[in-house]
Amino acid sequence: MTPEQVFLQHRPLLLGISYRILGMYAEAEDVVQDAYIRFSQANDVRDARAFLATIVTRASIDRLRSAKHKREEYIGPWLPEPMADNSISDPALLAEQQESVSMAFLLLLEQLDPVDRAVIVLRDIFDFDYAEIARFIDKSEEASRQIASRARKLVRRPIEEPVLPDAHKQKLLDAFMKACSRGNLESLMSLLAQDIQVYTDSGGRVRAAARNVVFGQDNCARFFLGILKKYPPGSVAVKRSINGQPGIAVFVHGKLYAGVSFAFGTDGKIHSVYSTLNPEKHSGLRKLKKPGLLYRIVARIYTGMLG
């Protein structure tokens, strides 16, 4: 095979590693592209997978360290960049690990320093052995084991926890959209967990956002109904799969305005909502299918904005 063919074979894995370490889709794509350039220029590479994974892991760690100060100065809640499920070129890879790419899990990873985060991603999600990981991060095998043990005390793979069936998630999302579109506060509150949290990431660039995380069933329900009034005229929301979960994409005259993903509990309630309005964080959503003209007309006539 040519170097390009070999690289393309490993690209979904490399993008998956970098995205989970960085929480930034556009930067992960840059890291993977840089890895290809180095790989294409290298001579006598005996293990392409290990070679590429080493480059991607180290580059992702370096970028995450550099991003720390910028994230500390971010205006309002900071969220990882959302990702449309069809941005992953290998559907099987996403299906096997969809919980590990959820917003809830990516936010858990934010508690870890860059090296600890990389080790958890490599070991607990992609099942690299400790000898491989030690080479990737330039530490001993024993040190890699200790890092993983320490990091697991802070985060736990959501894939090990019970999850709500997808069909139930879709029904819950339908009910949420219906309650929002009708302005029904009581119905909306019945769908939300008592301790629900709502994150709206705008980077200070969008008016329809909260500067702080919103907590609690009543506060969040009223926030949803109030914030919808600040959305631009012509806004239409459609269900789309985001970060391995049923979500909502909001378009304004065919242009993406917000990507919204959810965390659902086994109690049949919505436990967290993650709304990304900052247009700089929409690169991972560029493959989302836009609503057609007929859908936009019908949605505006019958539901005002949501449909």
Image (spheres, rainbow, N blue to C red):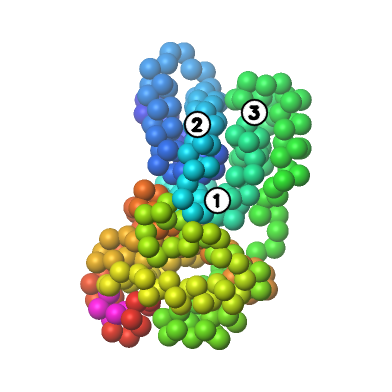
Instruction: Give the residue at the far top of this rendering.
Output: 43
141 left or right of 11? right
Which of the labelled discs sits on residue 66, or is there none? 2
Residue 99 x, y percent position in the rendering: 59, 55
Label 1, secondary structure: give it: helix
* Residue found 48% across the figure and 17% down from its top: 45
270 over 244 or under it: above or below: below
Q: Residue at x 46, y 50 (%)?
A: 75
Magenta-colored segment: predominant secondary structure: helix
Residue occupying image coordinates x 60% and y 34%:
114
Badge number at residue 133 = 3
Frontmost residue, 222 versus 279: 222
Q: Describe the element under mark 3 as helix, strand or loop.
A: helix
Left or right of 203, for residue 173 = right
Residue 85 in the image, given as x and y percentages of width and height: 45, 55
**Discs 2/3, front:** 2
Magenta segment:
296-300
For the residues labelled 2 and 3, say whether their Cβ atoms are less than 8 Å apart: no
| Spot occupied by residue 11 in the image (x, y as percentages of width and height) | 44, 36
Q: Quadrant of the N terminus?
A: top left
Q: Which mark is residue 101?
A: 1
Against 11, is 174 above or below?
A: below
Q: Are marks 2 and 1 in contact (CB under 8 Å)?
A: no
The answer, for residue 97, to whether it is visible in the render is no
Query: Which quarter shows the C terminus?
Result: bottom left
Numbered disc 2: secondary structure: helix
Q: Residue at x 48, y 73 (%)?
A: 224
Amino acid marked by disc 2:
Ser
The type of residue carrying mark 1 is Val
- Residue count near mark 3 (Cα–Cα under 10 Å), binned few <14, some 14–19, many ≥20: many
